[in-house]
Image: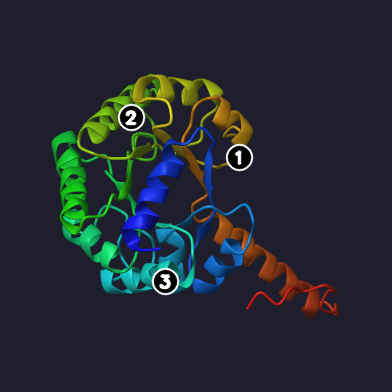
């Protein structure tokens, strides 16, 4: 499939009645391992995990060229649409999206970092315009950090802020609104009611409703951020500990690389 075809499919998956689950990956081998599963319809990269792979902290500390090189390798290494976590756009959301499309990326997360609303909306508009100029129906998952950077504020303030920003991002052309945070059914229902059914994306965390419930609540997408890499690294540490303690490699290791 072409990048435009992958992007159209990714947008369709966001608006389909069935919840879109995307398991986050960080390099080509993690991507191909997950893409091989029958349940995989699309993949998402995790910026935190890719930065950690190269030895950088999260938060646009990794050089953009390195980030784009990796997401491009991932996109070219699998046969499903790839949504890239491109943080806040690395200083130029439009140009970053344009370059990501050139790497074969079909969609992206773009976070607002709780910047003034007009600045955040301008970044979304720039990203959408860049994709339109490339002729790609890009699936932009516009992220609001109302909860991530709004810690300490009353819950109702964060909910109202997320809804206001989410509506503005959709009006600016975003496909979906990503509202990461640790909250339950009631907040998810408020966000869906305020932003729109099949327009809200959340992150799977302990305490967040299970996928089946998220689908019942009208959520479009759930992803898992850097947690997937942490699980893999935890398994590696556990294996190393077992070997150091005199253990042996377990039976049934799958040759996934």
Q: Earlier in the sequence, mark 3 or mark 2?
A: 3
Residue carrying label 1: 206
Please give the name of the residue rendered at 85% of the width and 80% of the height, measured from the top-left corner.
246
Above or below: residue 24 compared with residue 209: below
Residue carrying label 3: 76
Q: Earlier in the sequence, mark 1 or mark 3?
A: 3
Q: Position of residue 219 (x, y in %)?
A: 48, 31
Please give the name of the residue rendered at 46% of the width and 43% of the height, measured from the top-left corner.
13
Q: Is residue 135 left or right of residue 74?
A: left
Give me the disc on residue 162. Answer: 2
Q: Is residue 191 left or right of residue 160?
A: right
Q: Quadrant of the N terminus?
A: bottom left
Along the line of sight, which residue is nearer the eye, 92 or 78?
A: 78
Judging from the image, what secondary structure is the residue with disc 2 in? helix
Along the line of sight, which residue is nearer the eye, 143 or 105?
A: 105
Q: Position of residue 105 (x, y in %)?
A: 35, 61
Q: Is residue 40 visible?
A: yes
Q: Quadrant of residue 125?
A: top left
Within 10 Å of disc 1 (Cα), the crowding (few <14, some 14-19, many 20+) is few
Q: Position of residue 51 (x, y in %)?
A: 40, 67
Mark 1 vs mark 3, CA separation in Å:
32 Å
Within 10 Å of disc 3 (Cα), the crowding (few <14, some 14-19, many 20+) is some
- Point out the frontmost of discs 3 and 2: 3
Residues at discs 3 and 2 in contact (Cβ within 8 Å): no
Above or below: residue 179 compared with residue 196: below
């Amino acid at each position: 499939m072409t990048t435009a075809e992958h992007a159209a499919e990714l947008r369709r998956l966001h608006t389909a009645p069935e919840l879109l689950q995307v398991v986050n990956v960080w390099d080509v081998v993690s991507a191909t391992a997950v893409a091989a599963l029958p349940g995989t319809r699309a993949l998402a990269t995790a910026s935190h995990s890719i930065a950690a792979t190269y030895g950088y902290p999260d938060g646009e500390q990794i050089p953009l060229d390195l980030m784009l090189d990796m997401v491009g390798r991932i996109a070219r290494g699998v046969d499903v649409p790839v949504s890239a976590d491109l943080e806040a756009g690395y200083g130029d959301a439009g140009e970053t999206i344009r370059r990501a499309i050139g790497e074969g990326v079909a969609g992206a997360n773009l976070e607002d970092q709780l910047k003034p609303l007009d600045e955040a909306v301008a970044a979304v508009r720039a990203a959408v315009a860049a994709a339109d100029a490339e002729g790609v129906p890009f699936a932009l998952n516009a992220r609001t950090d109302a909860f991530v950077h709004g810690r300490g504020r009353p819950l109702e303030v964060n909910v109202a802020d997320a809804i206001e920003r989410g509506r503005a991002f959709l009006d600016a052309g975003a496909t979906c609104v990503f509202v990461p945070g640790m909250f339950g059914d009631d907040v998810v229902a408020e966000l869906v009611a305020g932003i729109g059914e099949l327009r809200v994306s959340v992150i799977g965390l302990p305490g967040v409703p299970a996928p089946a419930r998220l689908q019942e609540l009208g959520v479009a997408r759930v992803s898992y951020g850097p947690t997937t890499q942490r699980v893999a690294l935890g398994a590696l540490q556990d294996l190393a500990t077992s070997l150091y303690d005199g253990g042996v490699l377990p039976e049934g290791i799958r040759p996934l690389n």
